[in-house]
Amino acid sequence: MNHQELINDKITMVDDPRFCMMLKIADEVHQLTGDIVECGVWKGGCSIFLSKIFEEKNIWVCDSFSGFQDPKDGKYFYKQERHLKGELSISLEEVKSNFNKYNAIRDGVYFLEGYVKDTLNPKTCPIKTISLLRIDVDAYSATLEVLDSLYDKVVDGGYVIFDDSCLIEAHEAIKTFFTNKKMSYIVDPVTHENINIFESSSLPCGCYFRK
């Protein structure tokens, strides 16, 4: 589908370069087993796009649909957290309406409603394997909560995209995760060059890595 329509209709905050990055890796993702998962969907624009370009795969649309969780309720504490409870709240009904507008509701599209620390609990989460994990939850704790629950489900060769890697909260969460995994490089979505996250004071939006 033409992602510019989603941008023009203002149901996504993802810009053209980040959509182009997903198109660039699409052929490789098609060859992998595993589902497509987006955590943090706002109005659903990017999930709609993913459901269209990966029509043969399950699509998981994961969001609280009630905005950010209270920082004090997160699994991890970050003193510079700026995301307050309830901000950017878009209801599940509105997101489903947007899916219907673009004829993106189909078998294999699933909506997981709730905070990721609850819905992605490894003991109860229905997601089994992942070929593309897109994380757009903004906050420090939520970013780490997604990785805690889903990273091990990403197949070898699968992709993890951090839409909000440009935010200090997400950058610090990436540093924490990469330290634990003994990793140091993430990929710029525009130039596709490696960036050392420990040597860079800031990151562009939409950075990714391949497992």
Image (cartoon, rainbow, N blue to C red):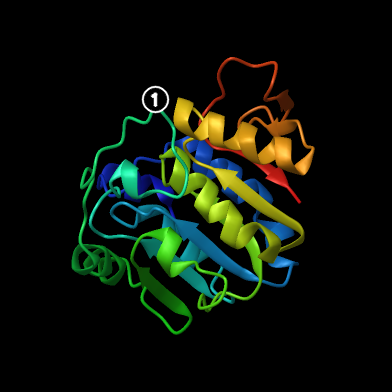
Q: Secondary structure at mark 1?
A: loop
Q: Position of residue 62 (x, y in %)?
A: 41, 63
Q: Position of residue 87 (x, y in %)?
A: 22, 43
Q: How many marks?
A: 1
Q: Answer few, some or many: residues within 10 Å of disc 1's Cα (few below 14, many 20 plus, some between 14 and 19).
A: few
Quadrant that contains the N terminus: bottom left
Residue highlighted by disc 1: 80
Above or below, 203 against 7 in this view is above
Taking the spot 25% from the left edge, 50% from the top edge, the residue there is 67
Q: Amino acid at mark 1?
A: Gln
* Residue 173 visible somewhere in the drawing: yes
Taking the spot 39% from the left edge, 71% from the top edge, the residue there is 112
Taking the spot 44% from the left edge, 38% from the top edge, the residue there is 77
Above or below, 100 against 147 in this view is below
Q: Position of residue 171 (x, y in %)?
A: 54, 30
| The one of 176 and 160 positioned closer to us in this rendering | 176
* Position of residue 1 in the picture relative to residue 103 (left or right): right
Name, please, the residue furthest toward the bottom: 107
Taking the spot 28% from the left edge, 49% from the top edge, the residue there is 11
| The one of 126 and 31 positioned closer to us in this rendering | 126
Q: Position of residue 4 (x, y in %)?
A: 38, 45
* Residue 167 visible somewhere in the drawing: no
Q: Which of the 4 image quadrants contains residue 127?
A: bottom right
Above or below, 97 against 183 in this view is below
Q: Which of the 4 image quadrants contains residue 48?
A: bottom left
